[in-house]
Image (cartoon, rainbow, N blue to C red):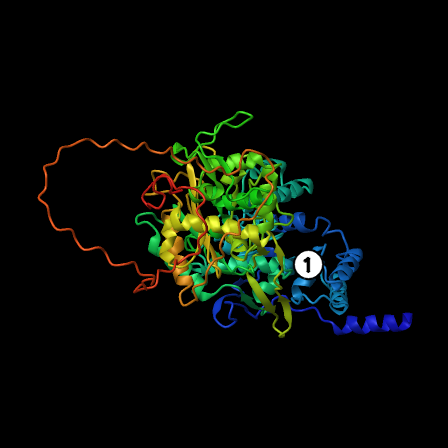
Amino acid sequence: MAVLGAAGFFIAYRSIDIPDPNADFLTETTQVYYSDGKGQLGQFAVQKRDSIDYDEMPQYVKDAVVAAENQTFWTDNGLDPKGILRAAFSNAQGNATQGASTITQQYVKILYLTQERTWKRKIKEAILSLKVKNQLKKQEVLEGYLNTIYFGRGAYGIQAAAQAWFAKDAKDLNLKQSAALAAIINNPNRLDPDNGEEATEQLLGRYQYVLDSMEKMDTAPAGEVSQARESLPKFPKIKESAQYGGQRGHALTMVRQELERLGFSDQEINGGGLQVTTTFTRKAMTAAAEGVAEQRPEGFGPKQLHVAVASVEPGTGAVRGFYGGQDYLQSQINWAVAGGQAGSTFKPFALASGIESGFELKDTFDGNSPYELPGGGRPIENQGDNSYGRVNLIKATEDSINTAYIDMTLAMPDGPNQIIATANAMGIPPKEAANPAYGIPTSSPGLEPNTGVALGSQTVSPINMANGYATIANRGVAADAYIIEKVVDRDGVVRYTHKVATHEALPEGISDDVGYALQQVVRSGSGTAALGLDRPAGGKTGTATNGAGEVSSAWFVGYTPQLATAVMYVRGKGNEQLKDWLPSYFGGAYPAETWTAVMTRALEGEEVEELPPAAYVKGEAPTDGHEYVPPPPPPPKKPKKPKETKTPEAPSTPQPPPPPPPTTQVPVPTEPPPTPTFPTGPPTQPTFGNPGNGNNPRVRR
């Protein structure tokens, strides 16, 4: 057995050749399609790759990459046998792909693009690593590595990276730029500062690690490191490829990140010839873009006013369309992913939690303003500081009464935590995700168990908000949001197929009660602008304020049985003042009108479907004092004593003939009575004021 093993190893060693690092080994373009698998959404292709000699590479680049990736590179033997075996076992068992531990092994892995998780592939990789170690000098290995490693932005190799990130040749890179590029190798797409503040902070941390390692290895002077580590180098604006224009760049970025989450490498994504079918439909994507363009107020450019849209299919979680804001070539921030403060669009999750705890739609709560909190602190006010008296949960939702929701939260056992647990079950991610965010956000920053959680100070992405409302549309059954249906490799092998996973987030009756309250918001409450859809719909308006008391976002989120859509308006960096800047900053204004325009296009040609009526679930209230008490009847009016008046005598006249006897036949109406368009429930409480007036600022929130 030993002799046969040695012979087999010898034959394999002699038959496997080291690939030419200058050959174009990434030639097959990855194609990305709409949900029909035919219409092309975009592609990932090899854009730039220029090889340069070792002597043309600046010393700072070589030292920075060694410090970042393999600090023992110049002295080790280039192999990590334990690491190879560990990765082989892990990958062969279908676990997450493990990276190589040395630059030599990373270089070999680049030369073998395939991500096949088999012993055969791992043995080839090990033999090639040994061959590279025995036949190539360290300088040759580092040269090949720096000419082939992926640096993001479609750039392979240090020369292309210098152009893509700093618009200069590699030989002109300084210490800060070299350290930044060495840091970016770790995760080129996640560490791109164009992806927002979080990405910038992560890159800064990795960048400082590289500089500190260089100082430790005596490859960079301490004084220069101290000065350089304070901030990242400046990244000039680099013109993106035209294929990323409009919303396409946002879509491809989401797809790329989701492919990474699924375990595909950068090399496979960019040049592995993958066929990726997404959930996006051309119809829903066009509806989002055209709906925003139709309703965006004139004079407010995309650099300041950001409008985001996301549409999710109830029952599956498939993201059918989105609008991320400005053209991707102008800004890479996707507001449909980044999100903003949720405001009162978070109240349906609190309503669901309240009914779960035992309250009923007819139960009443304190709708007066201001509401004094039991433990002190700043009182809670309603929009316009209006007082409503005691209101039931339908009225509290219909007119978005803050104080009633605070009263309900405090009346629930551990109310804030209950509300968050219900929201999580319905599709809203927790404050901190267990895994890093990818194509779809997996966290809701600021989602904390405080008394005002129902009022929505936390940041939620429109994609996740639409998915949460899709749970209501699907009568309490939730599904995870997703954007990739299938991935097929260049050999025709299906590498991934999405399987819809659902769970009961709410009992059907509770979901129907929440939905009924949301239907009243559209029918006669703060969201009457959505009546323009001319279909049964439920929805909720939202207007959030930031820590400075400024109106930071305006929302409308709504649904029909076929589609749930969230619309968000934010300004500047996402939390700047909308009040007195936009002509109207309430969720019932521009956001609701935009929602109607988007949904009208997205549902064109679809059958009109009804929404379920209220179930009026009976419960055992966790606290007393919230029962519905009908108002006392008005006291009977005393009859007025007629005034005595003298009338002149009238001349006698003949009496008319007696009327004919009554008939027992019921008259037949000439037309049948009108059938109501939407399902209705019994009246639960009188309506105050004029909530149906779209120009009433009291209810436009």
Left or right of residue 325: residue 445? right
Which image quadrant: the N terminus? Answer: bottom right
Q: Which residue lies furthest to the top in this view?
A: 376
Foreground residue among 676 and 3: 676
Q: Which residue is drawn at 62% across and 42% down?
A: 211
Q: Residue at label 1?
A: 106
Foreground residue among 584 and 137: 584
Q: In which quarter of the image is residue 221?
A: top right
User: Residue 429 appears at what percent x and percent y?
Assistant: 58, 48
User: Residue 433 appears at what percent x and percent y?
Assistant: 62, 47
Q: In which quarter of the image is residue 492?
A: bottom right
Left or right of residue 490: residue 245? left
The kind of residue tagged 1 is Gln
Q: Which residue is drawn at 63% across and 44% down?
A: 210
User: Residue 271 appears at what percent x and percent y?
Assistant: 58, 66
Q: Residue at x 63, y 71 (%)?
A: 494
**Secondary element at tag 1:** helix
Q: In which quarter of the image is residue 18?
A: bottom right
User: Residue 632 appears at what percent x and percent y?
Assistant: 43, 35
Rendered view: 373 above or below 34: above
Foreground residue among 253 and 151: 253
Rendered view: 648 above or below 235: above
Which image quadrant: the C terminus? Answer: top left
Count neighbours of disc 1 (C-alpha within 10 A) and say few if under 14, some if 14 to 19, many if 20 or more: some
Residue 450 visible in the picture:
no
